[in-house]
Amino acid sequence: MATDLQESSTLALGEINKYDFRTDTPTVFKAQRGLSPEIVSQISEMKREPGWMRDFRLKSLEIFNSKPMPHWGGRIGVDFQDIFYYLKPAEQQGKTWEDVPEEIKKTFDRLGIPEAERKFLAGVKAQFESEVVYGSLQEDLAKKGVIFTDTDTAVREHPDLLREYFGTIIPPSDNKFAALNSAVWSGGSFIYVPKGVSIEFPLQAYFRINAESMGQFERTLIIVDEGAQVHYVEGCTAPMYSTESLHSAVVEIVCKKHSRCRYTTIQNWANNIYNLVTKRAVAYEGAMMEWIDGNLGSQLTMKYPAVYMMEPGARGEILSIAFASAGQHQDAGAKLVHAAPNTFGRIVSKSISKNGGRSSYRGLVKVEPGAKKSRSSVVCDALILDDKSRSDTYPYIEIEEQDVSIGHEASVSKIGEEQLFYLMSRGLSEAEASTMIVGGFIEPLVKELPMEYAVEMNRLIELQMEGSVG
Amino acid sequence: MNERLEIENLHVAVEGSEILKGVNLTIGRGEVHALMGPNGSGKSTLGYAIMGHPSYEVTAGSIMLVDADGTAHDVLEMEPDGRARAGIFLAFQRPMAIPGVRLADFLRHSVTNVRDPDRKEGQELMPMREFRGELKDKMKELSMDSDFARRYVNDGFSGGEMKRAEILQLAMLRPRFAILDETDSGLDADAVRLASESIARIGGAEMGILIITHHEQLLEHNIPLKTHVMLGGRIVESGGPELAAELHKQGYERIRKAYPEAAAAEEEMEAERRLEPAAS
């Protein structure tokens, strides 16, 4: 009965926002709220981790406690003692789709993404309440020696490979939230692509939060070996909750010589979530790293995907879209570090603010001494839909080398009266016309997304735009 | 009686200065009217006012859409999209670029709304297959490459491409009344001939068309029932097709001399524009 009641109320909610709902998920184990060495040790114990990982977690907790909150970006109103740091939804990880609990399938169904899952079922990884509950790997990937698993499993099954890189790209001391993640991390993906192997289709993962007042701290590590190629897609569409919630992920990527990696994210966290994420890649000789980052949801997002170009010929590209609506602050950006000659970087950032939302571009381009002939370009375009909304740009450029070329362009525009009139003169309502103009504004980035995500992205934008004109 | 667009004593101001000073014009469905006049006489303003541009304030007069049974609809009460759904179309002299929006996607939306004026936002669009088929046919008739529909609306279009895109929209939307604002400008002689033929084929007896032009070539296949001359914000003279030929060949000297009051108003408007170089 309880489930029925829940169902009907969620259906009614669904009419307001298709992406706001909850299903009853049986939670097998619930850790207590708060953060202490005991809780951190308990998490490590629950996961039956080796001693080095427990020590890494405990050391990270010390670092977290010793670091002050960042004084820039947005206001972070999180009570760290009022959060569940670990939840385990099911005792065993599902081996096949049939083994996945019905409740969880229902949640995915409701999100309207089953096409993507059916299509790439074998490659899909889904994180649900802190653990990967479903994971299977397409056979030919396994034959090629590709490892695609959740990070917890990787600690047990690929300890040497994982340990070589884990926490080396983003050490716990990097920032307060990287330290927090390092202490309490759970789930996330571990990917290894062997030398010369190209994965033709995108590897996908869906991360979602579905327990009240619960933090989610996934940890992803991707190693792309020499000459290999991979595209990883992470999509987030979270239900809405009444109390504050924290999401703090760490994503580390290693692009070895002449490899290519593209990492695509669409986050649509509920509007009460603090989304504080550290993402960084290192790219070696001739390697190419691309971040495609879409931020639609959350109360506050602070996320600046970074590429460190370590050897000659490395390339880094970061494309980001931020959409800030009422009560939202998207403090998103990018970071490029040219640490070797002949490296090439590009940042394209597009932000949209409406109904009093605030979006900020915060970016750093750094050229280290000796990184001659390096080139970087930064383009940030902001679109503001009304007078209540706000957009800021904080571009930082640090150049310690003469022989370089760095370009920066920024534009802020409002939806033009002339554009609106033109579309309306063809029978589009003001709301339809605005949505179309916004869709066009982000199209250069949306077209980089795999088809299903492009469709979902456009649908999310439409939902965001509903009722924005009046 | 025939369906018609009736404009009576229309006064229009832009940023406080009056541009149209009492325009009277009635266009019946199935009729072609030509509107000529020197630059700055108010021709484009009339087009914008009929379509409902928010910067063009109607200070007096009326625009009515009258059905065959005599029912009159007040156009001034409608938003621009309502006017489009009621069957009014404006081919822009300088259409706006909408970067990132594909012509086909925009047109499918537009065609759906105009053909189903009661459609609510979010309801199904015209079926993709049906739309694509029709679009393909129309593009073929206009000798347009089918790739064209995948380009972003007017973004990076040449002058000629913009005008052809406007004619394509005219063909797809099939309005009851169309205002074509210098659809011939920026086109070479062959392109103007093609445009003229296309408009005649699209319009036929189904459309009332107001052609704003400086030349008579666009009228070659669209013989106007009446030619109107605008000067200083008023229509000062109306005649047949021969009037268009005369103005094209001989300019507006005779008109200025015959209507000194309107010519003075035109000079005044011209002077005001020079004081505000920013206004286009």
Image: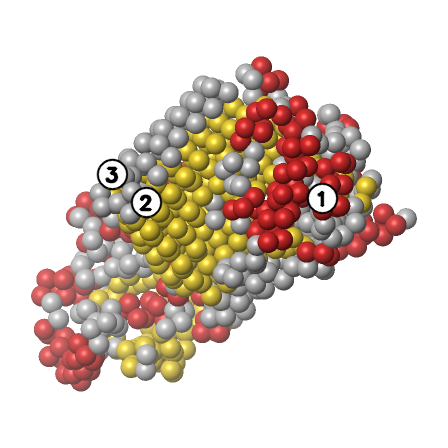
Kindly report which numbered mark, 3 or 1, lies closer to the viewer in this rendering: 1
Kindly report which numbered mark, 2 or 3, lies closer to the viewer in this rendering: 2
Per the model, the C-alpha gap separating discs 2 and 3 is: 10 Å
Circle 3 residues within 10 Å: few <14, some 14–19, many ≥20: some
Kindly report which numbered mark, 2 or 1, lies closer to the viewer in this rendering: 1
Instruction: Say what secondary structure mark 2 lies in.
Output: strand
Instruction: Say what secondary structure mark 3 lies in.
Output: loop
Q: Quadrant of residue B149?
A: top left
Per the model, the C-alpha gap separating discs 3 and 1 is: 47 Å
Q: Give coordinates of residue A227: x percent, y percent.
A: 42, 22
Q: Nearer the viewer, residue B208 or B86?
A: B86
Q: Residue B61, can we see it?
A: yes
Q: Nearer the viewer, residue B181 or A140?
A: A140
Circle 2 residues within 10 Å: few <14, some 14–19, many ≥20: many
Kind of residue at disc 2: Val
Mark 3 or mark 1, earlier in chain: 1
Q: Give coordinates of residue B21: x percent, y percent.
A: 29, 81
Q: Quadrant of residue A204?
A: top right
Q: Quadrant of the C terminus of chain B?
A: bottom left
Q: Quadrant of the N terminus of chain B?
A: bottom left
Left or right, A18 with respect to B4, comes to: right
Kind of residue at disc 1: Val
Residue at the spot of label 2:
A367
Q: Residue A325, can we see it?
A: no
Circle 1 residues within 10 Å: few <14, some 14–19, many ≥20: many
Residue at the spot of label 1:
A40
Q: Chain letter of disc 1?
A: A
At a point 42% along the width and 43% down the height, the residue shown is A318
